[in-house]
Image: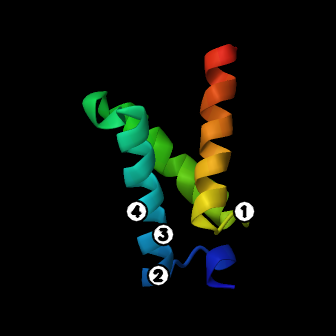
Amino acid sequence: MAKFSGILRPSDLDVLQRVFDHFCEERRLTLKDRDQREQLAREVIYDFQNGITDEAALLHSLSKRYAARRQA
């Protein structure tokens, strides 16, 4: 329930950080501007707070979203 109240536990933050770091490395976002990293952070948290709490599922959701953007 902590996820839905806006309060994140340390274990939640660990998951979010791993997903963020993995996606940044995979997409080489660390070499790009700050705005892209901040947008990614917002998206990771949004997905997590909307029920996607599994690391693999979060990565999959982000990958699908970024792939759709490239095709648009």
Where is mark 1, residue-wise? 50
The local crowd at label 2, few if under 14, some if 14 to 19, many if 20 or more residues have their Cα within 10 Å, is few
Q: Are marks 3 and 4 in contact (CB under 8 Å)?
A: yes
Q: Residue at x 31, y 28 (%)?
A: 33
**Image x and y of residue 18, in percent:** 41, 62
Residue type marked 3: Val
Residue 12: x and y in percent read: 51, 76
Q: Residue at x 55, y 58 (%)?
A: 45
Circle 3 — which element? helix
Q: What distance separates the C-alpha of mark 3 from that of mark 1?
A: 15 Å
In the picture, residue 31 is in which quadrant?
top left
Secondary structure, mark 1, is loop
Q: Which residue is labeled 2 in the image? A: 11
Name the residue at 67% across, 47% down: 61
Quadrant containing the N terminus is bottom right
Mark closer to the observer (4, 1): 4
Q: Disc 4 residue type?
A: Gln
Q: Amino acid at mark 1?
A: Asn
Name the residue tied to disc 4. Answer: 17
Which of the two labelled residues, at mark 3 and mark 1, occupies the earlier sequence position?
3
Residue hosting label 3: 15
Screen quadrant of the C terminus: top right
